[in-house]
Image (cartoon, rainbow, N blue to C red):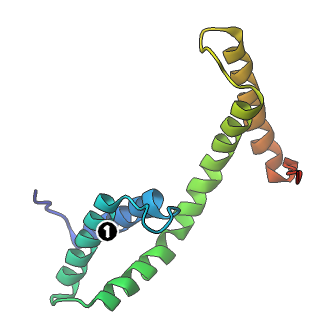
């Protein structure tokens, strides 16, 4: 597959690949990474950097480049987390407090209503609403 991209589009694609890999592998334990994604991302970033520098690159240069990319995508990740985490937390709370045995009965309706309630609370009042009790 060949992409005909401008220099700017190549840069955006490199950030996009790296951001996707961070999203998929960033919170996984060592050894649990999705290796195919990590491999393709590293290969593409290496080729991008070699094309940009017009020479072979060393591993330390690729690591430095990844650190630079991480700084550039941190705000994108923070935005994503800010928008997505409340939905995920609301779902987890509803799943825990209002489990659904059958998606065709009224427990599912209650579950959805409570999930929506949790979402609204989290978006209106933020995390100051959350209290975690030690057991």
Q: How many marks?
A: 1
- Side of 38 relative to 69 (left or right): left
Judging by the rendered image, the residue that carries numbered circle 1 is 14
> Which picture quadrant has residue 61?
bottom left
Mark 1, secondary structure of its residue = helix
Placement of 88 over or under 105, stated as above or below: below
- Side of 102 relative to 30 (left or right): right
- Side of 106 relative to 36 (left or right): right
> Which picture quadrant has residue 54?
bottom left
Report the residue at 83% width, 46% height from top. 125
> Which picture quadrant has residue 63?
bottom left
Report the residue at 41% width, 62% height from top. 33
Report the residue at 68% width, 45% height from top. 86
> Which of the two residues, 42 or 36, is positioned nearer the viewer here?
36
User: Label 1: few (<14), some or many (≥20) within 10 Å?
Assistant: many
Placement of 29 over or under 90, stated as above or below: below
Placement of 9 over or under 119, stated as above or below: below
Q: From the top left corner, tell me how far across and down residue 69 is, in percent.
A: 42, 76
């Amino acid at each position: 597959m060949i992409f005909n991209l401008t220099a700017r589009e190549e840069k955006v694609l490199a950030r996009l690949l790296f951001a996707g890999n961070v999203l998929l592998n960033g919170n996984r334990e060592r050894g649990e990474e999705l290796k195919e994604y990590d491999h393709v991302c590293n290969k593409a970033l290496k080729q991008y950097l070699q094309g940009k520098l017009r020479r072979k690159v060393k591993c330390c240069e690729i690591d430095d480049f990844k650190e630079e990319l991480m700084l550039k995508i941190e705000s994108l990740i923070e935005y994503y987390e800010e928008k997505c985490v409340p939905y995920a937390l609301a779902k987890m709370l509803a799943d825990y407090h209002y489990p659904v045995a059958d998606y065709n009965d009224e427990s599912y309706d209650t579950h959805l209503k409570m999930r929506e309630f949790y979402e609204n609370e989290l978006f209106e009042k933020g995390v100051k609403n959350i209290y975690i009790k030690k057991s």
